[in-house]
Amino acid sequence: MSAALFVLSVLFGLLPRVGATPTASAQGAPESLRVLFIGNSYTASNEGVHNVVRELGGSATPPRTIETAAVLIGGASLATHWSDGTARARIREGGWDFVVLQCLWWADAGQTELTIYQYARLFDAEIKQAGAQTVFYETWVWGGGSRPTDTDWPYDLHDQVVQAYHAIAAELEAVVAHVGEAWWRSFEQRPALDLYDADNSHPSPAGTYLAACTFYAALTGENPMGLAYVSMGVTTEDAALLQQVAWETTSGVTLPPPPPPPVPPPVQSPEPPVPPGDQPSGRCGSLGLDLLLPLAVLRLARLDRRGRRR
């Protein structure tokens, strides 16, 4: 496919969706997997996507062994990793089932064919030579662009990035972990669950957890719903939603949404204390029976004296 046709395919979404379901290799994956992640701080943030994927596998029933390793350089693109040489050396060690490539789209905007695709092809050749399969880490968009309600960022950039991943994966017959699309779907279902960190670029703990659940589904072909492992900073209710979103995005099957987190009952304000003189204690008004009885006797005595005078 020519460079010009590839660019048109990316921009106008002419290529089919890739990785909506795991490839035959992923579906037939053995119980034990070895996965190498190559990326930057988007992969390393919080607990690290690679570490959460390993923990998710260990929490399955029965447990699934997913051995993960990572070559991570802050702010690195695939070109940076290629020049550094460490990632290539780890790939050549062999024994990997999958090698994950996380690109740096927001730094390479407008240079897709010259930079990202070029180094994706180079890495894919190394990965295939080592007997592994390439997996593309379809990231979210920097600056809040994967938030459907964020109007301060070009609304079509999310789709452009997604289609770019689909295009290169179609060419190389690679797997796509649809993390960016899972983020979009999650924001649609529960906008208040923010997947971005405070810098509006890196993932929050929930964002990392959703990415890991999406990888689990892409690598194993299995539904992550019900996995016991929950990352720090993520509630069990949010984890259930993120697991479901990851599976729906990967499998293309839409399920009924899980119930939202329970709303805590309103806190009842305590009753203001009653002054001691106003507290009821079996009295009539503010006078007790100990005062009313003598008054009644006195009243009767006065009436008796008046009757005698008459």
Image (tube, grey):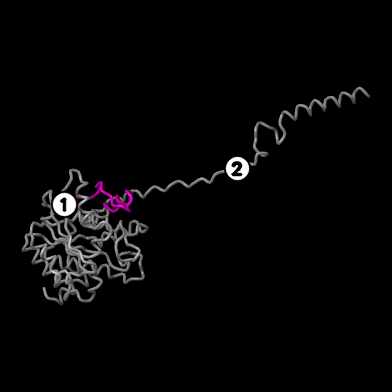
Residue sticking out furthest to the right: 310
Residue 281 coordinates in the image, percent (x, y): 65, 33
- Residue 264 included in the magenta stretch of the image: no
**Which residue does the numbered mark 1 point to in the structure image?**
66
Q: Main secondary structure of the magenta part?
A: loop
Residue 103 or residue 4, whichever sits in front? 103
For the residues labelled 2 and 1, the Cα–Cα distance comes to 61 Å
Question: Under tag 2, what secondary structure?
Answer: loop
The quadrant holding residue 1 is: bottom left
- Residue 225 included in the magenta stretch of the image: yes
As shown in the figure, which amino acid type bears the numbered disc 1? Answer: Ile
Residue, x 11% and y 62% (percent of image)?
Answer: 90
Q: Where is 300 relative to 53, above or below?
A: above
For this view, does 94 lie left or right of residue 13?
A: left
Residue 251 or residue 175, whichever sits in front? 175
Residue, x 15% and y 71% (percent of image)?
Answer: 117
**Which residue does the numbered mark 2 point to in the structure image?**
273
Q: Where is 114 relative to 296, above or below?
A: below
Name which of mark 2 and mark 1 comes first in the sequence: 1
**Which of the image's four quarters has the C terminus?**
top right
Residue 30 coordinates in the image, percent (x, y): 11, 50
Residue 285 or residue 5, whichever sits in front? 285
Q: Dot 2: within a 10 Å radius of its alpha carbon, few (fewer than 14), some, or many (20 or more) residues?
A: few
Which segment did they paint magenta? 220-243
Q: Dot 1: within a 10 Å radius of its alpha carbon, few (fewer than 14), some, or many (20 or more) residues?
A: many
For this view, does 207 lie left or right of residue 62?
A: right
As shown in the figure, which amino acid type bears the numbered disc 2? Answer: Pro
